[in-house]
Amino acid sequence: MAGVDRNLEDENARLKLRIAELEEIRRELAMALESAQAASRTKSAFLANMSHELRTPLNAIIGFSELLVGETFGPLGHQRYQTYATDIRKSGGHLLSLMNDILDISRLEEGKAELSERPIDLEQLLRETRTMVENHARSAAVLLSVDITPDLPLLQGDERRIKQILLNLLSNAIKFTPPGGKVMLSAVRAEDGAIIMTVKDTGIGISEADLPKAFESFGQIDNRLSRKYEGSGLGLPLARHLAELHGGSLTIQSDVDKGTLVTLRLPPQRSLGTPNGGDRLTA
């Protein structure tokens, strides 16, 4: 009997020791999580503050370069001045776009972003989005097409944000598609009422191992690509955050050297159930 009691005491001692060890691990994990969250907040605050500080002089640079390009106060003289002013305006616009993306990412990661919702005519939005990237596609020698079913309902959402998602996806697709390739934007209403929009390209593709990196802020899938293709690595992460802010999702399927398919799904509750009507739009 004494032996049994002794064994029970030993077992209880081991259990208490194990519980103490687990509690210590829990405390360490909690501290690590708190530290990581604090670091993330500090990073987001730093990026937001820096973006605000940079936007003020950048807007001035863009404004003055536009005056020069337009020769508002008279001819510039040598043609090279016109070329330089145009380059300054383009570079300033690119930097401002990057700053805006950084601000958006910071707000989204901190949960401070809000939607300005209203009913959206999807066919009109998709036409406008296509128009905005047509010159980009043309200069890249990429064929851009749009396929929209005629029964699309009105969508309740933030029109600027939805357009921002599609512009990011289309710009990426065009950028990573070689000359002579194709990019297609499609939109359908699923059987459950969800709105499905896809951007499909015949570009260089992404390996399965690299797909998770595509959604990391400032992530670069391949160093060789980061040198060859201009970009901040914010487009896809930002698009996914904005999709999730609408209660939707953004997914990627891709094969190296075959192309990429990005799918934006917006939930049925965002459909107002009023079809636009009209003929099928293809272009």
Image (cartoon, rainbow, N blue to C red):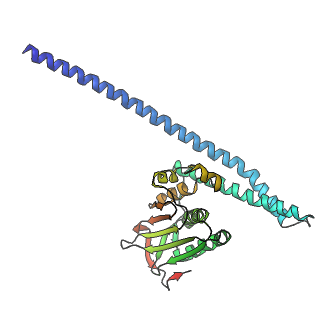
- Say whether residue 277 is left or right of residue 71: left
Q: Quadrant of residue 129?
A: bottom right
Q: Is residue 42 above or below residue 246?
A: above
Between residues 212 and 27, which one lies in front from this camera angle? 212
Quadrant the N terminus occupies? top left
- Asked if residue 193 is positioned above or below residue 98 in the image, the reply reads below
Give x and y (percent) for residue 131: 63, 74
Q: Is residue 46 visible?
A: yes
The residue at 49%/37% (across/down) is 36
* Quarter holding residue 29: top left
Asked whether 146 or 121 is in front, the reply is 146
Residue 27: give x, y in percent of width and height: 39, 30
Q: Residue at x 37, y 29 (%)?
A: 25
User: Residue 160 at x, y = what percent?
Assistant: 58, 65
Residue furthest front as drawn: 257
Q: Quadrant of the C terminus?
A: bottom right
Residue plotted at (41% across, 69% down): 194
Measured as percent of width and height from the top left, residue 232 is found at: 62, 52
